Image: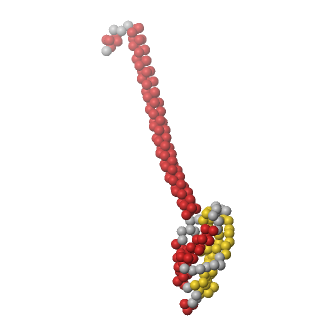
């Protein structure tokens, strides 16, 4: 190898030295760029993982929001069903309630003529409440039938209060003062 180097003149040796130096410099630049690119790739990989996790969280949040929306729509349908099926229609007035009470009394086999009505607006609940008071006079079996008819009736008729001023002892007639509440959707 020394003989080969001795065979070269000075100009060729300088050219070879410059080429070797340029090769070393190119190798150094390549190594520096390789480490920088490798570090950049690691940063990009971490950023990609972070964005992937963010995308998964966003998809989960979207799915939860869709599920919440479906629950709210179902609740809205339930409320609409309550308004149409269980509340009285405020536009029809109290006539429907009066007819329903007559129907309930007929199904129970009793006649009640003295009905007192009171009205209350419950603005927070968006409901109008009508209170109906009456006195039942009859047997225990008739009272049970009346309560069963009230319970089975599809509209919201709630028994607010029951007083028993006369308890028909010894199989006699009993007396009960009822206060019913009917609700109108606003």
| Residue 97, quarter of the rendered image | bottom right
Which quadrant is the C terminus positioned in?
bottom right
**What's the residue at 47%, 45% (across, down)?**
56
Determine the residue located farthest toward the bottom in the rendered image. Answer: 170
**What's the residue at 54%, 71% (across, down)?**
153
**What's the residue at 44%, 28% (across, down)?**
34
Nearer to the camera, 166 or 47: 166
Q: What color scheme is it?
A: secondary structure
**What's the residue at 57%, 61% (across, down)?**
84
Q: Is residue 154 above or below residue 42?
A: below
Q: Is residue 116 visible?
A: yes
Q: Is residue 173 above or below residue 161?
A: below
x%, y% of residue 142? 54, 82
Nearer to the camera, 149 or 20: 149
Nearer to the camera, 123 or 110: 110
Q: Is residue 183 above or below residue 33?
A: below
x%, y% of residue 109? 54, 79
x%, y% of residue 77? 54, 57
x%, y% of residue 61? 51, 49
Q: How many marks?
A: 0
Q: Is residue 44 left or right of residue 168?
A: left
Q: Is residue 68 visible?
A: no
Which quadrant is the N terminus positioned in?
top left
Q: Is residue 112 left or right of residue 3?
A: right
| Residue 183, quarter of the rendered image | bottom right
Nearer to the camera, 178 or 18: 178
Q: Is residue 43 left or right of residue 178?
A: left
């Amino acid at each position: 190898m020394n003989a080969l180097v001795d065979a070269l003149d000075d100009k060729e040796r300088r050219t070879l030295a410059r080429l070797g130096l340029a090769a070393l410099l190119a190798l150094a630049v390549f190594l520096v760029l390789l480490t920088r690119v490798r570090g950049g790739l690691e940063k990009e990989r971490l950023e990609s993982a972070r964005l992937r996790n963010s995308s998964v969280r966003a998809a989960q949040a979207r799915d939860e929001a869709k599920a919440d929306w479906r629950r709210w729509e179902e609740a809205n349908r339930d409320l609409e069903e309550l308004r149409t099926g269980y509340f009285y229609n405020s536009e029809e007035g109290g006539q429907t309630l009066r007819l329903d009470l007559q129907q309930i009394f007929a199904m129970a086999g009793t006649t009640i003529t003295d009905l007192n009505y009171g009205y209350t607006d419950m603005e927070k609940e968006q409901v109008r409440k009508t209170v109906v008071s009456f006195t039942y006079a009859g047997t225990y079996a008739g009272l049970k039938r009346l309560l069963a008819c009230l319970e089975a009736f599809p509209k919201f008729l709630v028994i607010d209060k029951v007083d028993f001023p006369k308890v028909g002892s010894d199989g006699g007639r009993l007396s009960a003062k009822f206060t019913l509440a009917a609700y109108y959707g606003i």
